[in-house]
Image (cartoon, rainbow, N blue to C red):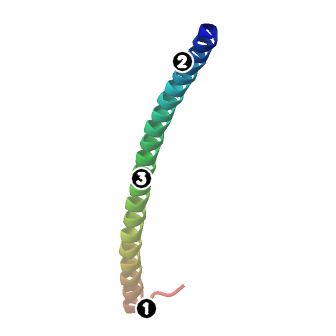
């Protein structure tokens, strides 16, 4: 009977150790996922900033084109 109890205790200890290892891996993976999510948000912010800069540059370019067309009309320059 004592042998059976010892065997059960050994198995339970092995199961507890395996669960502890699994929990440790889970915590590491969750931390890594959080880090990746943070990095992805940073990349998205950078992309949005780039889009904003592109939009401002396009507005400026459109303004320059309109001014150039107006100057060409006044000087009667045509292609």
Q: Is residue 39 above or below residue 78?
A: above
Of circles 1 and 3, which is in front? 3
Residue 54 drawn at (x, y percent)? 42, 66
Which residue is pictured at 38% across the width and 75% down the height?
A: 59
> Callout 2: 10 Å neighbours few (<14), some, many (20+)?
few
Q: CA distance from mark 2 to mark 1?
A: 93 Å
Question: N-terminal of the two: label 1 or label 3?
Answer: 3
Q: List the single residue furthest toward the top.
A: 3
Query: Along the horizontal axis of the image, is 79 left or right of 37?
Result: right
Label 3: how many Cα within 10 Å (few below 14, some 14–19, many 20+) = few
Check the picture and name the quadrant holding the N terminus: top right
Q: Secondary structure at mark 3?
A: helix
In this view, the residue farthest toward the front is 1
**Mark 3 vs mark 2: in front:** 2
Q: Which residue is mark 2?
A: 13
Residue 61 falls in image quadrant: bottom left
Q: Does dot 2 land on a helix, a strand or a loop? A: helix
| Mark closest to the chain's N terminus, 2 or 1 | 2
- Badge 1 crowding class, 10 Å Cα cut-off, few under 14, some 14 to 19, many 20 or more, is few
Query: Which of the two discs, 3 and 2, labels the residue nearer the N terminus?
Result: 2
Residue that label 3 marks: 41
Q: Secondary structure at mark 1?
A: loop
Identify the residue at image location x=36%, y=70%.
56
Which of 18/48 is in front?
18
User: Disc 1 marks which residue?
Assistant: 76
Quarter of the view holding residue 70: bottom left
| Residue 39 position in % (x across, y down) | 43, 45
Residue at the (45%, 48%) spot, across then down: 37
Q: Is residue 7 left or right of residue 62?
A: right
Question: Cβ–Cβ below 8 Å for labels 1 and 3?
Answer: no
């Amino acid at each position: 009977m004592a042998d059976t109890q010892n065997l059960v205790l050994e198995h339970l200890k092995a199961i507890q150790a395996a669960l502890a290892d699994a929990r440790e891996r889970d915590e590491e993976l969750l931390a890594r996922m959080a880090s990746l999510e943070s990095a992805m948000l940073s990349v998205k912010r950078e992309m949005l900033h780039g889009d904003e800069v592109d939009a401002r540059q396009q507005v400026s370019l459109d303004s320059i084109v309109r001014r150039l067309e107006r100057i060409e009309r006044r000087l009667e320059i045509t292609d």
